[in-house]
Image (spheres, rainbow, N blue to C red):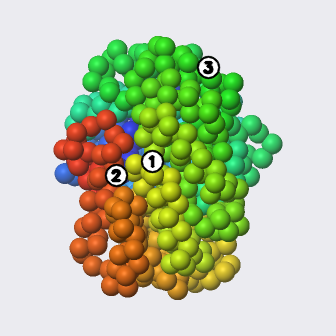
């Protein structure tokens, strides 16, 4: 049986790689197709003669998924399933023409059961984790249980991307260390996920030995690897595990790596362990410099003092610091947005990364924004920016939205250039324009290049590819 996966960005996708690995382990043939990498993706998918087509979908890319699925259906009548965050938290997607099934939550066991039933011509309407549309009826099944022992899963199928040039040129490989997050940040899917899986263990860690073994194989197979990327929500959530992992990584792998960590997890010990393990850059989610917004709206109980101390400890150990910030929060004023810039300056961040708030379905901040008038009655999830770095649906309903937009575009320079923040307090009253937009994109490039183990040209190509993603969402 042949299963084709479809995604709309040029990069690794862990969901697809894990699904491909488990399906290949059970005798299936798999292939991936990437939007933007083909002259006619629909024609090529149809020519590949799949038995099942699976899309991965984040909010903001759902229109592209819908359009592509409908185009495929006009050519071949093959079952189409959509998984990922959007159908998980917006299951009404099943009603869209061209989509036969959606997968909600962890998909490995669900998709494997689906494929086995399709092979044997068995009924697929009662599979845990699936919503199935058949004969003008929608079968809404309960979620499949979370996979608790991640070591039981096969390692991701990296070779599925072998046909693409971006893969063959890639020198930074992401590795999944864990799944789940115990916190309740209002802007994040994780809080909603905890409700979906109430009563189950949400945070699940792979064993240090399992991870180290995978990385050894990757390093041997792809000798071009210069850096590993750990995109997990919070490295260091389990201190005992963290100590073991850092020591083994430092002794047995010793390649630079990127990791995200909460500011309140950073101590003298954890910072020293990161240094021992050859950590190249740490990313900390600051979100906002306004303490009231952070604690009351974002539900993140970390003080500015904790952020400043964490930054000091990281830089004391000669580790680069990236900060992740969000503008256009509900009720945010220009003065509050400047507090975010000021906190980044105090932290002396190497790479200030600025996002725009995206009110994803199922999140607390989406409900808060709707209930308090920060999203209009005509709001549609079609307005979501899948990259989350260009536009925010809340901008037009914030009193200072236009000024914050200029601050967003020039944020990097306000943090990095001494005295520019004073000039910026005047520049924000100039209407946004193509010069500010161009400076914003160049700032992204500079920030990206500052913490990646690549030269300027490689950083340009990689970040340019990422920046262009949202322009293909239609």
Please determine whether, in this image, residue 116 is positioned above or below residue 214.
below
Q: Is residue 95 visible?
A: no
Q: In the rendering, at what x and y percent does residue 449 appear?
A: 30, 46
Q: In the rendering, at what x and y percent does residue 2 appear?
A: 39, 32
The answer to which quarter of the image holds residue 272 is top right
Assess disc 3: are there few (<14), some (14-19) or many (≥20) residues with their C-alpha within 10 Å of its C-alpha: some
Q: In the rendering, at what x and y percent does residue 373 appear?
A: 62, 83
Q: Secondary structure at mark 2?
A: helix
Residue ID at (69%, 63%): 295
Q: Is residue 403 visible?
A: yes
Label 3 sits on residue: 244
Residue ID at (43%, 65%): 385
Q: Are marks 2 and 1 in contact (CB under 8 Å)?
A: yes
| Quadrant placement of the C terminus | bottom left
Q: Secondary structure at mark 1?
A: strand
Assess disc 1: are there few (<14), some (14-19) or many (≥20) residues with their C-alpha within 10 Å of its C-alpha: many
Is tag 1's residue or tag 3's residue first in the polypeptide sequence? 3
Label 1 sits on residue: 322
Residue ID at (41%, 78%): 425
Calculate the distance from the C-alpha at mark 1 to the C-alpha at mark 3: 24 Å
* Rendered image: mark on residue 344: none
The answer to which quarter of the image holds residue 31 is top left
| Quadrant placement of the N terminus | top left
Q: Secondary structure at mark 3?
A: helix
Q: Nearer the viewer, residue 77 or 66?
A: 66
Residue ID at (64%, 68%): 293
Calculate the distance from the C-alpha at mark 2 to the C-alpha at mark 3: 31 Å
Label 2 sits on residue: 447
Q: In the rendering, at what x and y percent does residue 186 appear?
A: 65, 61
């Amino acid at each position: 049986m042949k299963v084709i996966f479809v995604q709309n960005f040029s990069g690794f996708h862990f969901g697809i790689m894990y699904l491909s690995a488990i399906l290949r382990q059970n005798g299936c043939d798999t292939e991936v197709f990437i939007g933007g990498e083909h002259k006619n993706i629909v024609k090529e998918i149809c020519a590949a003669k799949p038995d099942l087509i699976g899309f991965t979908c984040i909010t903001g890319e759902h229109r592209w998924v819908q359009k592509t699925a409908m185009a495929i259906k006009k050519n071949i009548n093959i079952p189409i399933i959509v998984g990922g965050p959007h159908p998980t938290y917006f299951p009404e997607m099943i009603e869209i023409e061209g989509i036969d099934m959606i997968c909600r939550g962890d998909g490995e066991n669900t998709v494997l059961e689906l494929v086995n039933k399709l092979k044997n011509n068995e009924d697929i309407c009662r599979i845990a984790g699936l919503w199935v549309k058949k004969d003008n009826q929608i079968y809404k099944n309960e979620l499949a249980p979370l996979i608790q022992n991640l070591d039981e899963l096969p390692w991701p199928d990296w070779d599925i991307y072998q046909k693409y040039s971006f893969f063959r040129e890639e020198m930074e490989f992401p590795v999944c260390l864990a799944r789940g997050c115990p916190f309740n940040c209002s802007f994040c899917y994780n809080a909603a996920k905890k409700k979906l899986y109430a009563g189950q263990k949400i945070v699940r860690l792979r064993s240090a030995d399992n991870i180290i073994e995978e990385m050894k194989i990757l390093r041997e197979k792809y000798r071009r690897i210069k850096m590993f990327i750990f995109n997990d929500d919070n490295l260091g959530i389990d201190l005992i595990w963290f100590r073991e992992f850092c020591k083994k990584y430092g002794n047995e792998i010793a390649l630079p790596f990127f990791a995200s960590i909460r500011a309140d997890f950073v101590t003298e010990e954890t910072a020293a362990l990161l240094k021992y393990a050859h950590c190249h850059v740490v990313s900390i989610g600051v979100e906002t410099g306004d303490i009231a917004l952070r604690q009351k709206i974002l539900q993140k109980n970390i003080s500015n003092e904790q952020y400043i101390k964490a930054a000091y400890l990281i830089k004391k150990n000669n580790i680069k610091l990236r900060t992740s910030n969000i503008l256009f929060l509900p009720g945010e004023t220009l003065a509050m947005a400047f507090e975010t810039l000021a906190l980044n300056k105090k932290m002396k961040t190497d790479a200030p990364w600025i996002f725009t708030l995206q009110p994803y379905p199922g999140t607390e901040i989406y409900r808060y924004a709707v209930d308090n008038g920060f999203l209009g009655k005509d709001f549609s999830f079609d307005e979501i920016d899948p990259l989350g770095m260009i536009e925010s649906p809340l901008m037009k309903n914030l009193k200072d939205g236009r000024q914050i937009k200029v601050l967003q575009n020039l944020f990097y320079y306000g943090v990095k250039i001494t005295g520019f923040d004073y000039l910026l307090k005047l520049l924000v009253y100039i209407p946004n324009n193509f010069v500010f937009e161009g400076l914003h994109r160049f700032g992204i490039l500079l920030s990206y290049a500052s913490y990646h183990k690549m030269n300027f040209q490689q950083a340009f190509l990689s970040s340019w590819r990422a920046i262009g993603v949202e322009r293909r969402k239609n």
